[in-house]
Image (cartoon, grey):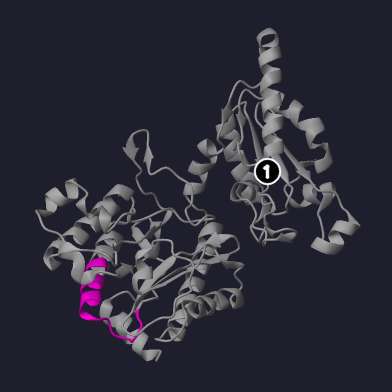
Amino acid sequence: MDGIPPDVFAARRAAVFRGLGHGVMVLPAAPLQRRSRDTELPYRPDSELFWVTGATEPGTVAVLVGGDEPRFILFVREKDPEVELWSGPLMGPDEASERLGGAEAYPLSELDLRLGGLMRAGDRIHVRLGCHAHLDKLVVEALADARARGPRKGTGPRGVVDPGEILDELRLVKDVHEIGRLRAAAALSVEGHRAGLASLRPGVGEWEVQAAVEGVFRRGGASGPGFGTIVGSGANACVLHYVDNRRVIEAGDAVLVDAGAEVALYQGDVTRTWPADGTFRAPQRALYEVVEAARTAAVACVSPGTTVGQIHAAAARVLVEGLVGLGALAGVVDDLLAQEAYRALFPHQASHWLGLDVHDPGDYVRGGAPRVLEPGMVLTVEPGLYVPAAQEGAASPFAGIGVRIEDDLLVTPDGHENLTAALPTSVDDVEALARSCR
């Protein structure tokens, strides 16, 4: 359970049961992924399964049966000395029941025998179809059985619902254990960025900066990066999810680094843009100052009662005002905003939820109304401007420059806590820090 007390998971399941009614929820472990042939990628547990149960072992399937007498059932791999020789200890049903909250626990080999009957007890099956082929087959069989028998008995599932209808809302507001892990992930992400900057200079490969960042993550106890580390120098910074990291950094480059540590399955997500020589060139500095002003405005919006849409709108307005001031966009600010004329240079939203997943679940609009921030929510703020190298016209003086600045914020009762404030963002502080590393 990664240090989270069992009663926390029990309380989470109680909340799930309240939303489940007489339904059944089936949560399988993430599948093992192969890099090639028989070489496996490092295993990363499924976020939903972990949040509900604390289970991290491959092959696990959790079943929650709602109703007047809710049941929590686990199917896990049996103890097997030969498998454990190669892959490490397995819990087995008895240990799984003891460690994971007293669940009914059975060998995974009994899943086919038991799951149909468990699903027939519910009026809806909450399962994420398309992720587990064999489980999909069992769900379809349960639905077919209900179609055949249901009219006479008035029982059985009549539909499939995505588990996110219940879990996404519950996961959106973090508890104290989650906040502690997110703070740790953010702090380690900051330290990784500092190490990356210390290695960054003309003549160094983007991959070397990546290695410096991720080395700190691992030394600090992270399982590694929570997503593909981005080190985009020069025009590569204009590719939003650039992860090749194969270019040699050149004199005069602005280098965008987007990286986050995964600590106890929780994510950091931080972006900074650094001058390779310690000083931005004039067009880089001008664009950077616009993005930093947008970040400052957006961060100031983060507080209970604000919506994510308002955060984006605050960032977009400052970006458009700045681009008009630089001559990179022509027109009236309000008209340009209404037309979203900035999207060629700022194509993404200014923030996203953060938690067990780097893009954590949760609707930004609910029932047609914008989501209102509440204490305990965690989100990023990340405005950016990206001017393609082939850009012509008014923005051409900034062609090939990409700037993004991203912080992780916790919504608090009286405002927010910037979890990544220890890494500077003002242009003067960024240049001073970059020069101090030379």
Above or below, 388 against 70 in this view is below
Q: Label 1 sits on what residue type? A: Pro
Is residue 127 magenta-colored? Answer: no
The answer to whether residue 359 is left or right of residue 150 is: left
Observer-nearest residue: 305 or 265? 265
Residues drawn in magenta: 275-291
Quadrant of the rendering where the N terminus is positioned: bottom right
- The structure residue drawn at horizontal position 88% and vertical position 54%, both measured from the top left corner, is 80
Quadrant of the rendering where the C terminus is positioned: bottom left
Q: Residue furthest right?
A: 81
Using the rendered image of the protein, determine whether residue 418 is visible from the camera's viewpoint.
yes
- The structure residue drawn at horizontal position 51% and vertical position 64%, both measured from the top left corner, is 228
Secondary element type, mark 1 = strand
- The structure residue drawn at horizontal position 23% and vertical position 76%, both measured from the top left corner, is 285
How many numbered discs sit on the rendered protein?
1
Observer-nearest residue: 85 or 408? 85
Is residue 282 magenta-colored? Answer: yes
Question: Dot 1 corresponds to which residue?
Answer: 28
